[in-house]
């Protein structure tokens, strides 16, 4: 979740650079509350690398994630674009799962992922 999901996404993009040799090299990938700002083409590239399920869990109410990401990123933040952890990817082959179960606790959903990761995985249909 969070920055870990961003690292996973970055690794999938790196594997996509191998072209056909990278296709289907990863069984399944689950990312929740990601701090990345992917383009639609990036989602397509990561989809090619993952043979099984590519799951993207997000929570639109996660204002803490949106604020932290816009302030703490090393690179520029796309103007007006929230991080992927607060919106659906809306890409064929990417399973968008809205995590409305993560109710805001004083606006702190991002910090609750570590305690609720099992809930997220179960909602995604993963074996836990």
Image (cartoon, rainbow, N blue to C red):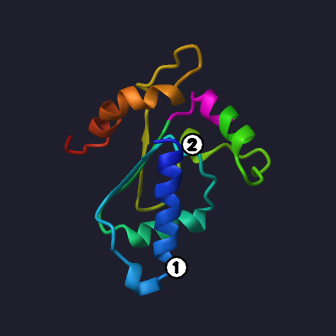
Q: Quadrant of residue 40?
A: bottom right
* Element under disc 2: loop
Report the Cα–Cα distance between label 1 and label 2.
26 Å
> In the rendered picture of this protein, how many numbered marks are placed on residues?
2
Q: Residue at the spot x=29%, y=63% of the render? A: 52
Q: What are the residue bounds of the magenta stretch?
A: 59-66
Residue for point 63% across, 28% down: 63
Does the image show residue 30?
yes
Q: Which residue is mark 2?
A: 87
Return the residue nearer the eye: 103 or 36.
36
Image position, residue 18 (x, y; %): 47, 83
Q: Secondary structure at mark 1?
A: loop
Query: Label 1, on which residue?
Result: 17
* Vertical placement of residue 17 versus 81, above or below: below
Tag on residue 36? none
Decide which of tag 1 and tag 2 comes sooner along the chain.
Answer: 1
Seen at 44% across and 25% down, the residue is 102
């Amino acid at each position: 979740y969070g920055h870990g999901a961003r690292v996973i996404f970055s690794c999938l993009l790196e594997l996509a650079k191998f072209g056909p040799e990278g296709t289907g090299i990863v069984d399944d990938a689950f990312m929740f509350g990601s701090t990345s700002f992917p383009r639609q083409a990036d989602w397509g590239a990561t989809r090619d690398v993952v043979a099984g399920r590519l799951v993207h869990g997000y929570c639109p109410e996660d204002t803490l994630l949106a604020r932290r990401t816009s302030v703490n990123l090393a690179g520029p933040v796309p103007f007006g674009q929230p991080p992927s952890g607060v919106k659906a990817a809306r890409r064929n082959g990417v399973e968008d799962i809205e995590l409305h179960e993560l109710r805001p606790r004083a606006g702190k959903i991002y910090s609750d992922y570590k305690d609720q990761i099992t809930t997220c995985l179960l909602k995604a249909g993963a074996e836990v």
